[in-house]
């Protein structure tokens, strides 16, 4: 199904849902009502609520002003710039849609040339920020990962997942900074300060209220997680979004267009299809087959490498929804740490997106200076494909070696 959707450029959710119904009724002998009942309503509410709330923050100009404030205060220190854009891209990616972090690509890539920062390093920095922020409890990668894991019986804290993602991507960015060193700025650009040239935008009343709601949402999620409470982030986000819509109904109406229905249907179709495969026993069969490949660590390595390889060409969100259930037999076997395996799987699936075969990587390459575009394409492809091996190896030995941790 992944191959057909990719080759024919058809929305995967459109293929998966009717396929789930057909397979469920004809092969699994399930009533159609039971197949449809596998559609993940709780995940749908999460995705709708989060993308609506942060979409509202985008259409009323709050996110634009936060970005502007961050860029203005960042200055133009070449050594710090990759980390500055890592933080900015991560912060925006944490606001519902990981791809929103790509808003910095048209700014960061030209800035890299003017500041003497290798465009390849800047591309890695933005992708690392998207990978880290996307696995936050309020963003799509994180929502899909920990919700699907919990529905499969694996208790994983969304804050743990986020913490592992941030740590891994900071280490990855630091390694990239040592490899792709600073160089002399282009002579014609030495006097240009693209970051400082960003015009300052004022915060109005609606922006301050939106920021208060954003802080309230994040604080509630963190406080609940620390107290062992599982908050419904989708309901919270819809509540804060309704409050902002009451203040400015026109913005609330415009924010409806920002709901990521494409991802909702993508995840819904895949999870429904995987539910049918679970009913047939296919997921358990593949999961146990992975367990029987040598040692448990080797099985974990193969699962993580598969996630990275397929994600480099296909939807990261879809891969997470499909492969997390596949890892359940190994995760629940006691041979490896269950939370560590899920964290490793999710980060390995997202860190490869700098490859130009993915939407993120293609956008970064297209945003690079014309004279650097071919080199950036070649090196980001090499970097992304190397992460298919390096990422799983690092995670397997760092996170999974301690059995039962």
Image (cartoon, helix red, strand yellow):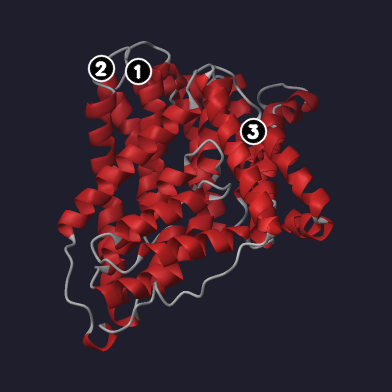
Instruction: Please provide percent x and percent y for residue 271.
Output: 61, 33
Residue at the spot x=69%, y=30% of the render? 42
Q: Is residue 294 visible?
A: yes
Asked if 401 appears above or below 76 in the picture, the reply is above
- Contact (Cβ within 8 Å) of mark 1 with mark 3: no
Residue at the spot x=46%, y=30% of the render? 159
Task: Judge the density around disc 1: few (<14), some (14-19), many (≥20) Cα neighbours within 10 Å.
Answer: some
Q: Nearer the viewer, residue 135 or 83?
A: 83
Asked if 404 appears above or below 373 in the picture, the reply is above
Counting residues from the start of the chain, the first of labels 2 and 3 encountered is 3
Q: Nearer the viewer, mark 1 or mark 3?
A: 3
Counting residues from the start of the chain, the first of labels 1 and 3 encountered is 3
- Contact (Cβ within 8 Å) of mark 2 with mark 3: no
Residue 375 is marked as none
Residue at the spot x=56%, y=39% of the render? 138
Instruction: Please provide percent x and percent y for residue 183.
Output: 17, 72
Counting residues from the start of the chain, the first of labels 1 and 2 encountered is 1
**Outermost residue to the bottom:** 188
Instruction: Please provide percent x and percent y for residue 310.
Output: 41, 45
Asked if 267 appears above or below 68 in the picture, the reply is above
Task: Judge the density around disc 2: few (<14), some (14-19), many (≥20) Cα neighbours within 10 Å.
Answer: few
Query: Looking at the rendering, which quadrant does residue 375 occupy?
Result: bottom left
Report which residue position mark 3 lands on: 233
Report which residue position mark 1 lands on: 337
Report which residue position mark 2 lands on: 402
Could you say whether the residue bearing mark 3 is in a helix, strand or loop?
Answer: helix
């Amino acid at each position: 199904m992944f191959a057909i959707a990719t080759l024919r450029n058809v929305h995967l959710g459109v293929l998966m849902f009717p396929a789930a119904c057909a397979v469920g009724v004809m092969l699994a002998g399930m009533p159609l009502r039971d197949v449809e009942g596998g559609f993940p309503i709780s995940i749908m509410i999460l995705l709708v609520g989060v993308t609506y709330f942060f979409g509202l923050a985008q259409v009323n100009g709050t996110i634009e002003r936060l970005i502007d404030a961050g860029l203005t205060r960042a200055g133009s220190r070449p050594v710090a710039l990759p980390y500055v854009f890592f933080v900015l891209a991560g912060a925006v990616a944490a606001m519902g849609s990981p791809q929103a972090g790509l808003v910095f690509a048209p700014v960061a890539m030209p800035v890299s040339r003017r500041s003497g920062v290798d465009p390849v390093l800047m591309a890695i920095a933005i992708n690392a920020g998207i990978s880290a922020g996307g696995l936050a409890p309020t963003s799509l990668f994180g929502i899909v990962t920990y919700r699907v894991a919990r529905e499969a019986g694996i208790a994983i804290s969304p804050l743990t997942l986020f913490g592992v993602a941030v740590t891994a991507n900071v280490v990855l960015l630091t390694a990239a900074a040592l490899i792709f060193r600073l160089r002399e700025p282009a002579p014609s650009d030495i006097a240009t300060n693209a970051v400082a040239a960003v015009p300052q935008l004022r915060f109005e009343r609606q922006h301050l209220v939106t920021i208060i709601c954003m802080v309230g949402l994040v604080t509630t999620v963190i406080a609940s997680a620390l107290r062992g409470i599982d908050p419904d982030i989708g309901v919270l986000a819809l509540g804060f979004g309704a409050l902002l819509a009451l203040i400015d109904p026109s913005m609330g109406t415009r924010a409806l267009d920002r709901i990521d229905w494409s991802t909702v249907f993508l995840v819904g179709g895949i999870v429904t299809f995987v539910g049918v495969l679970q009913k047939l026993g296919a997921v358990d069969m593949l999961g146990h087959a992975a367990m029987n490949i040598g040692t448990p660590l080797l099985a974990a390595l193969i699962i993580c490498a598969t996630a990275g390889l397929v994600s480099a060409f296909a939807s990261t969100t879809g891969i997470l929804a499909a492969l997390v259930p596949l890892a359940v037999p190994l995760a629940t076997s006691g041979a490896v740490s269950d939370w560590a395996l899920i964290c490793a799987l999710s980060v390995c699936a997202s860190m490869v997106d700098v490859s130009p075969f993915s939407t993120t990587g293609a956008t970064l390459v297209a945003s690079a200076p014309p004279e650097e575009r071919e080199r950036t394409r070649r090196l980001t492809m090499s970097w992304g494909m190397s992460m298919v091996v390096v990422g799983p190896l690092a995670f397997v030995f760092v996170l999974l070696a301690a059995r039962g941790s």
